[in-house]
Image (tube, helix red, strand yellow):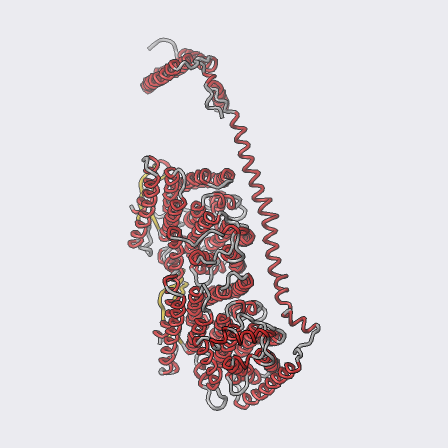
Amino acid sequence: MLTTLLIAVPLVAAVVVWILPLSSESTSGLALLAVLAEVGLWVGGARNFDFSSQTQQYSASREWFSDLGISYSVGLYGFQYWLVGLTIVVGAAAIGYAIWAGRERPRAYYGLMLFLVGSLVGMFSSQDLLLFYVFFEAMLIPIYVLIGVWGGPRRLKATVTFVLYTMLGSMLMLASVVAFGITQGTFELSEIGTSSNDWIFLGFLAAFFVKSPILPFHGWLRITYTEAPPELSAILSGVVPKAAVFGLVWIVLPHFPGPVDDFRGLVLVLAAATLVYGSLLAFRQPDIRGVVAYSSMAQMGLIMFGIFAVNDLGLDGAILHSVNHGLVSAGFFLLAGIIETRAGTGEFARLGGLAKGRPALASIVLMLGMFTLAVPGSTNFAGEFAILAGVFDRGWGYAAVGAAGMVLAAMYALRLISAILHDRRGSGGTDTGDLVGGELVLVIPLVAILAVLSAYPALISERSFPLDQPSSFISAQETPSG
Amino acid sequence: MIFGGWLCLLAPLAGFLAILLAGTRITRRQAGILSTASVFVGFAGAVIAFVDMLGRDTADRSEVTTAWTWLQAGEFKVSLDLLVDPLSVVMMLVVSGIGGLIILYSNGYMKGNDEERRYFAYMAFFVFSMLLLVESANLLLLLAGWGLVGLASYLLIAFDHHRPAAVTAGKKAFLMNAVGDATMALGLFLAIAKTGSLDFGPVFQAASSGELSDTVVTLIALGLLGGALAKSAQIPLHTWLPDAMEGPTPVSALIHAATMVTAGVYLICRAHPIFEAASAVQHLAALLGLATLLVAGVVALVQWDIKRVIAYSTMSQIGYMFVGAGIGAYGFAMFHLVTHAFFKGLLFLAAGLVIHRLSGEQDMRQMGGLRRSMPLTHLTFLVGTLALVAIIPFAGFWSKDAIIASSFALGGALGWVLYIGCLIGSLLTGLYSFRMYFYVFHGEPSAKVEAAAHGEEAHHGEGDLSMTVPVVVLAIGATFIGLLQIPGVWEPFAEFLEDVVPPLVTPSTGQEWLSSMISLALATFGSYVAWRAFRAGRELVSAGPIRTLLEHKFWFDDLYDAVFCRPAQMVAALLREQIEQPLVQGGLDEVADGTIEAASVAGRAESGLLRTYALAFAVAVSILALVFLVVR
Amino acid sequence: MSGPGIPWYLAVSAILFATGVAGVLLRRSPLIVLLSLEIMLNAANLAFVGFSRLHGEMDGQIFALTVMAVAAAEVCVGLGLIVAMARRRLPLDVDVFSELKG
C-alpha cells in the first residue's frame, strides 16, 4: 500500500498542478508539499520496514492484462527501498532548487517534475517486467520536455541527442521485454524464471548501458548534462542511471545467469574502460558540469564492476555506491547551478578564488569534492572499497584498474576544487557573496546525509538484501516461486 | 582503559564539529581555545588509558571494543573497533600531547589571520583522524584514518589558498598519498580474498601461521609498504614532503614532522606479523629507509630554506625509523618516533619563532646573529639540534643510536650495509644540522634581522606566552625523554612494547655503547666540519656536478613529471581532442543535425490538402488489400 | 429464403464504395465529400447485412445499426461545421483549408 502511495502522491500532484489554475506561488508550494510528503512517507515507512525479511514489503498486486500475464505489481526489497529514498531526496532537492531559481511556466514545469519523480519511484518499485518498462518510458517523457523547453542555449540538439540514444536503447529493451515475457508466459518477475537467450540479454544490456552510460554508449552525456536545467541534471546524473543498476540487479542478474557468466569478461572490460576514460576526460573538462558529468560516468563504470562481480561485496557495494554517487553528483549539479547563477558562468577560465570570504561555499565545495574522490573514511570510499574488493575475486586486474581510478579521481576532484575555490580570482566571480539561507537549505541536507552515512555506511550495505546475503538471494530468484 | 581511548578519540572530533557548526558565532580566539582544549582533553584520555594500562598485568594490556558495524557484506564484516594496547597508547600520547602543544602554539602564531577558525577546525580534525589511525583495530579503519590524515594534510598545506604554490603543494601531497592509499587498498583486497577479514587478529594470525602462501603475504606486505612509503615520505614517494613546507609552520611541526609522517613506521610495527612473514619486503623497507636517510641527508646540505632543511632532516630521521622497523627493532623504531616527535616538533616551532619575528622570511641567508636578539629561541633551537645530531645526553642519542646498534647486531651483509649507511647518516646529520644552526644564530645579523630587532615585533619579546611555553616544554622533553632508555641501566620503553611487538634483534649492552660512541664521534666530527666551513664562509658542497645533482634533488621531481604527470595529461588531452570531441561529440552532432534535417524534409509531405491525405490513405489500403489477397 | 445470392450484394456494396471513394477524392465541396463518406459507410453496411444474411446470424445487422448511429452523429458534426463555414462566408472548398501543412 505504501508503495502505491509513494508512486501516486507525485503523479496525483502532477495532475492537480496541470489541471487547477493555481498561481505560481501555490503551484510551487504544492509541488514542494508533495515531495516533502514523499520524504515523510518514506521515513515513516522505513521505521516499519523489515530489512531482513525474505519477502517483498508494502507490496500491491492487481491484474492488468490478464491474457498476457501483465499485472500492476509493486513491492520493495531493501535495495529498492534505498533507491526509492535516493529518488525522493534528490527529487525534493531538485524541486527546491527550481523554486529557488524561479522557473517560468511553473504549472507545466512542476507538473513534469512531479511526474518524473513519480515514474522514477514506480520504476524502482515495480515487480512486473512490463510495468517496469512502462515506468521506464514514462520517466523519459518529462525529461525530453524539460530539456527541450527549459534547457540551455543548445537545448534542441541536446534533446534530439538524448531522444535518439534513449529511444534506441528503449526499443531494444522493448523487444527483449516482449520476447522474454511472451516466451515465459508471464511478465511477473517473481514467476518469470530464467532464460539463456543471449539476444534478449543483450537487448537489456544495451538499454541499461545507454542509461548508465557505459563506453561507448555515452555520446548523449556531455551535452545533455550541460544543457539541461541544473536541477534536472541532478536527477539525470544522480537518479536516472540507477535505473540501470536496478534493472541489472533485479532483472538481468537473476533471470539471465548463463549469459551473465558468458559476457562477464566483456562487461567488466567495458566498465574498466569507462572508469578510466571518464576519469581522464573529467580531468580535461573546461567547466564544472563537464567534470561532474564525466566523473559520473566513471563512477557508473565502478558500480558496473560491483554488479557484475555478482558476489556479496560487489552487490552491497554497488547499492551503497549508487546512493552515494546519487547524492554527490546531485549535490554538485545543484551547486554548479548556484555558482552559474551567481557568477554568470561555470567555466573555469572565469571562475576561481571563490574561497576568499565565503566559508560556507568553500566548505561545501570541499566536502562534495572529497566525497567525489572517495577519500578513505567517507561513505563513497566504503562503497568503492566493497565494490573493488568484490571484483577482486573476478580478477585482480579489475581491482588494480579501480585502484588507479581512485588516484585519477583525486586528480580531477582536486582540479575541480582548486578551479572553483583557489587559483587567481576569475572575472566571473567578483560580485558573488557566500551562500545564503535558501541555497544552504538545498545542499546541506545532501551533504549531511553523506556525512551520516560516512559514520555508518553499513546502514545501507547491511540492509540492502535480506539477511545481507545478496548473492544467494539473487540466485534464489532464478527459480520461479509458486 | 577503553574509556580513555574513546575520550581521546572523540574529544578532538567534538572540537572540530563545534567549530564547524558554530561558524562565525564564535570569535577566532574562542575557536583557538576550543581546538586546544579539545585536544588536551584527548590527551587526558590518553593519560587515563596509559595509567590504567600500567596498573594491569602485561598479558592483559590489550583491549578491543566495538562501537558498531561499519561495513558489511555477506560474511565480510568490518566494525568501528577501537584497540587500546601499549603500541596504540604510545601513539595516542604522542599525537594528542604534542598535538595539544602545537595547537596551543598556533594560538599565537596564527593570530591576525582572517581564517583562523578554519585553521583550528582543520587542526582538531587532523588530530581526530590521526587518533583514528592509531586506535583502529582493523586494517580498513586504519586505512580510513590514513586517508583522513592525508585530507587534513592537504587542507592545511593549502591553507593559504590564495598562494598558488601552497595549493599546488597540497595537491601534490594528496596525490602521492592517494597512490599510497591505492596500493594499500590493493593489499587489503588481497587480504579479504584470502582471509575473509580485515581485523588485525585473523589477518596477522593467518600471516604468521603460514596459512597464506609466500606470494600472497609478499603482495599484501608490498601493498602496505606502498602506503607507508607515501605517508612517511620515503623514496620513491618522498617528493611531496619538502613542498609541503608551504603550509603554516605549526602544521609542518605537527603533521609533517611529529605525527602523520611517522604513521608508516607505526604501520610496519603494527602489521609486523605480515612483514615478518614477507621478510624480503621488510628488508626492502629497511633499504628504502637507508636510501632515504642518505639522499635526504645530502640534499639537506645545499638547502637554504630553513623549513626545507628541517623537512629533509625529517625524511632522513624517518629513514632511521624505517631501518629500525625493517630489521625488527620495533621498540627502538617506536622510541625514535617518540623522541623525534619532541625534538623535531621543537625545531619547527623554534624555527617558527624565527620566521614569525622576521615576518615570514625563511631563507637562512637572510638570517644570522639571532642568538643575541632571541636568546630563548636560540637555546631551545640548540637543544633541538643537539637532540637531532644525537649528542649525549639529548634524546636523539638514546633512540637513534639504538637503531644503529641493532643493525650492527643483525650482522650479515644486510646488517653491515645498514650499519655503515646509518653511520654515514650520523655524519650527515651533524653537517646539515649545525650548518643550519650556525647560519641562523651565528655570524653577523643581516639587515632584516637588525630591522626586526628594532622593529615593533621586538617589544613583544620572542613571542606570545602561548608560543614560548610549548617550545620550552618540548625542549625539556627533548632533553630528558631519552633517559627512558639507557642501555644496560633500564629500558622501560622497549619493555613496555615488548609484548605487543616482540623485537627480532636485540643488541647487547656492549654493542649499544660501542656503536653509540662511533656514531657520537662521527656526529661531533660532522658538527665540527660544519663549524669550520661556516667560519671560513665556504659551502659544504662546492659547485660542480654534485652540487647540481643535490640542488635538483636527484631529479626525482623532473623524472615523475616526465614519466607520470605529463603523459597522463597528454593522454587525457588526446582522448578529449582526438576521440571524444571529433568522434563521439562530432559524430553525434552529425546525427542530431541529420535527424533535424530529415524531419524537415519529411514535413514537406504534409501538404495540408485533405484530398491528398485521403488519396494516400486509399492507395495504401488498396495495396494492403492486394497484398493480403495475393499472399493469403 | 430466396433472392439474389451474396455476390450480388457484395457487388452493389463495392460499386457504392468505389463511388464514395471517387467522390471524396475528386470533389472539392465539403458537402459532397461528406455525402460521399456516407455512401462509403452505407456500402459497408450493405456488406454487413449481406454477410449477416449469409451466416444467419444477427451480429452483422447489429453492427449496421451501430454504424448508422455513428454516421448520424458524424453527419451532425460535419453539417454543423459546414453551416458554420457558410455563415462566416468562407469558401466551400476543401483545398483552401491547408492549415495542417507541415
Above or below: residue C1 compared with residue A152? above
Where residue B630 appears, as percent x and y from the top left, is 50, 22
* Viewer-side residue, A236 vs B386: B386
**Image location of residue A416, percent across then percent down:** 51, 55
Residue visible at 49% across and 78% down?
B346
| Residue B532 seen by the camera | yes
Instruction: Spot the residue most to the right.
Output: B544
Tell me where residue B142 appears, x and y as whole percent. 45, 68
Q: In the rendered image, which quarter is residue B32 located in? A: bottom left
Residue toward you, A397 or A190: A397
Residue C57 visible in rendering: no
Along the line of sight, the residue nearer the viewer: A371 or A109? A109
Percent from the top left, x then y, of residue A15?
A: 34, 37
Eyeballing the image, is B438 above or below B112? below
Instruction: From the viewer's perspective, tell me whether residue B542 is left or right of residue B392.
Output: right
Q: Is residue B31 above or below residue B497?
A: above
Foreground pick, A203 / A103? A103
Instruction: Tell me where residue A465 sits by quadrant.
Output: bottom left
In the image, what residue occupies the spot 53% across and 30% down?
Answer: B600
